[in-house]
Structure formats: structure tokens, C-alpha cells
Image: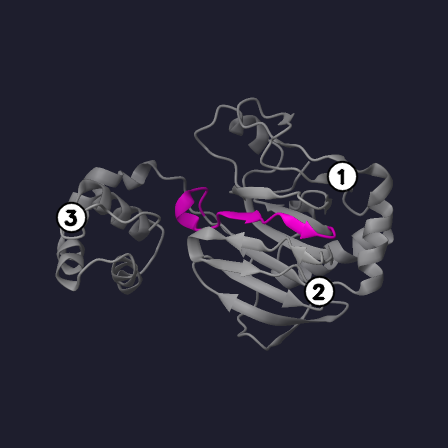
Amino acid sequence: MKQKPDNFQTVTPEVLAWIAAETALGRSNDAIFKALLDAGWQHAAARQAMRLTAQEASAFANPPSLPPLVAVPSVAVADAGATLDAGDKWVTVLQRQQDPDLVVFGNFLSASECEALMDAARPRLSRSLTVDIKTGGEELNGDRTSQGMFFTRGENAVVHRVEARIAKLLNWPVQNGEGLQVLRYAQGAEYKPHYDYFDPAEPGTPSILQRGGQRVATLIMYLHAPEQGGATVFPDIERQVAPQRGNAVFFSYARAHPGSHTLHGGEPVTAGEKWIATKWLREREFR
């Protein structure tokens, strides 16, 4: 829950709406109760909130208006420390958590692959754009101050190999992925917290979804680590991932909604520069 209510002892419509939304997203009662306690609620008030009927909560949250749940890429069940077959190499699971499903991989890319992607991308870099959710086009956004470019799927041998590795590890077809994007963050560059899915309420979204449906997962691969700063942060779950070369972080979002807890951003680079490669995965074939 992002904000604590003003009065922890009062079960407000907003609290009921939040409980209903979390329930609709499949979160367990135990997890919801713990979240209330973590937000500062007393046990008695939290129990009162949990006792209210689902009908009362639904009246405030209107769960039927939430975007539908969709299938998402997934990693074979593995705890931190496990190794997974990625087809042409073995990848280590460094961190694993649920809600959201988030995995940090070690040894995802080799040093030579990192160099090859940066070398191929460097001549084509330009100021990064974001999707304009009002029109379905692209626009400059002050929240994103990196430089970037896109490869087409399978554009060269390294891109082809990395895309096959992603498909194998995440059990998701290569054709359901957008082209690999390489980004360079110079000193001071950042990407403020945002969601990667396309907001269903925005007028430009239907046009965007024609190319392959909704985005359902993100994989960020670290090609070059800055001397300082540049961590990938997840404010909703109070987690950050250090940009270590060759590592990658994966997270999925089965519903295009803030309740996916996938708000994330790239902290400012304070020394040196950071390079990453991002792969966004769609519901269907991306054209």
C-alpha cells in the first residue's frame, strides 16, 4: 500500500478499495493483513478491515473495471543460488521474490557480448524517447534523460543469440518480444519511476496494442556499470538492483495496473556511465 491513511483506526472507503484491488490481483489475506500492519495499522483495526465483506470492498474498488489478468513469461521455479539452463549457457539466480515476480540473474551476458552490443549501438544512439500514450506515437520526456537505439529482432549474431537465450529462460516466444533496446546513461542521466505497461485508460493505448498486445514483462541487462549510482529501483517493494555488468533483472506484470507493484526507475548516474539493454515482452507476436 503506497500511503498510510490519516487515521489508522478508521476503516475508510479508500482502505476497502485497496483491499479489494489487492484481492482481485490474487494477493492472499495473510499478505494483505501483513501489509496493513507494515503500514502502521494496529491489529484490531486491521482485523476489522479484513472482516468486512468482499461485497462492501468491491462497491468501492469496482474490481470488474480492472484490466484483465493475462499470461506472462515465467522463470522455472528456482531459489536464489540455483542455476538455470538458458540454452547456450547456464545462468545463476541471485535474487528471487514474488509480488511482483522478480528475478535477478548473474552471468546472463558475457563481457564480449556486452562489448559487442555497445559497439553496435554506439553509432546509432540518440536522445531516448518514450511512448506517447495520448497518440500512440513517441515523444521526448523529461523523466528520461538517456540516449538509446533499437535493434530489429535477430539483427546480428549477438542479438539473435541473446534473444534465443531470453526465450529459453523465460519460456516465451522470440517473436513476442520487441526489438532489443540499448541505452546509455551518462553522468547525471536517469529514468524516473514509471510502469512499462501501457495504461488502458489512455486514448493512444488501443493503437499501441495493435502491434502485439500489452507489454507483460521486462528484462533489463547491464552492459556497463557506472562508478557510482545508476541502480534500478522498485519503490513499491523497497528494492534496488545494482547495475553489475553481465547481470540482468526480470519482472512481469500480469495486469496493467499499479497493483502489479512494478513501479521502477533508474537512479541518476553520479560517476561514470551506465549501459543497459532492455527487452520488453508482449502478449502476442510483435510486428
Marks 3 and 2 in Cβ contact (< 8 Å) = no
* x and y, in percent, of residue 175 in the image: 69, 46
Tag 1 residue: 149
Tag 3 residue: 11
Q: Residue 76 carries which label?
A: none
- What stretch of residues is rendered in magenta? 255-273
Q: Which residue is drawn at 56% across and 33% down?
A: 209
Q: Which residue is drawn at 62% across and 47% down?
A: 268
How far, Cα to Cα, is label 3 from label 2? 46 Å
* x and y, in percent, of residue 165 in the image: 72, 60
Tag 2 residue: 108
Report helix, strand or loop for mark 1: strand
Residue type at mark 3 is Val
Residue type at mark 2 is Phe
* x and y, in percent, of residue 98 in the image: 45, 63
Is residue 196 visible in the rendered image? The answer is: no
The numbered mark, 2 or 1, whose residue comes first in the sequence reads 2
Residue 272 is a magenta residue: yes
Q: Residue at x 68, y 56 (%)?
A: 221
Residue 193 is a magenta residue: no
Eyeballing the image, is 278 above or below 166? Answer: above
Label 1 Cα neighbours within 10 Å, binned few <14 / some 14-19 / many ≥20: many
Eyeballing the image, is 286 above or below 229? Answer: above
Q: Nearer the viewer, residue 273 or 93?
A: 273
Q: Residue at x 39, y 47 (%)?
A: 259
Marks 1 and 3 in Cβ contact (< 8 Å) = no
Report helix, strand or loop for mark 3: loop
Q: Which of 121 and 228 is in front in this view?
A: 228
How far, Cα to Cα, is label 2 from label 1? 21 Å
* x and y, in percent, of residue 57 in the image: 20, 45
Horizontal arrangement in the rendering, residue 91 relative to residue 53 (left or right):
right
